[in-house]
Image: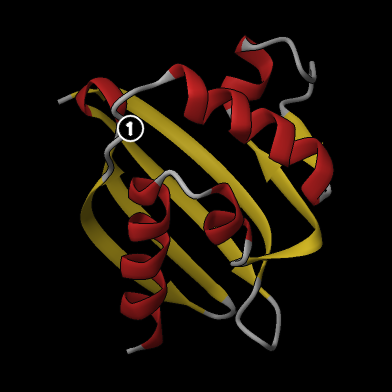
Amino acid sequence: MFAGQLANEWIAAWNSHDLERILSHYTDDFEMRSPLIVERGLSAEGVLRGKEDIRAYWSEGLAAVRPLRFELLGVYAGVNQVVIHYRSVGRRLVTEVLELDDQHRIVRGSACHGEAA
């Protein structure tokens, strides 16, 4: 199943700390939504657009959190969507809703953060 392949590669890319590998899953003009964007003062709306703005945000995050390690908990497939459920830094539960184009590249991502588990 494609959703499982994407989720496994997405998690592996983050765990590799290779920003270019991570960004390879996304279109150049993708949009990212996350409460962490608001927390870090990058956008009051919690939205960043385009690889260059998001590259800076993720580069800072990768440098600040060592070791960054995600644990895949579940994968859910929808119509042009994949939802990845994982355990993040500090054992925090996260779901990423990823909207895909017809080439299975991510055009929009939305992170939803839960409590530590």
33 vs 55, nearest the viewer: 55
Q: Quadrant of residue 108?
A: bottom right
- What is the quadrant of the N terminus in the image? bottom left
Residue shown at 33% from the left, 23% from the top = 66
Residue shown at 57% from the left, 21% from the top = 36
Residue 68 picture location, percent across and down: 33, 32
Residue 87 picture location, percent across and down: 24, 38
The image shows residue 64, relative to residue 70, as above or below, that is: above
Local secondary structure at mark 1:
loop
User: In the shown orientation, is residue 15 left or right of residue 90?
Assistant: right
Q: Residue furthest left?
A: 117
Label 1, on which residue?
68
Amino acid carrying mark 1 in the image: Leu
The image shows residue 31, relative to residue 4, as above or below, that is: above
Q: How many marks?
A: 1
- What is the quadrant of the C terminus in the image? top left
Residue shown at 63% from the left, 57% from the top = 23
34 vs 60, nearest the viewer: 60
Q: Quadrant of residue 102?
A: bottom right
Residue 116 picture location, percent across and down: 22, 21
55 vs 71, nearest the viewer: 55
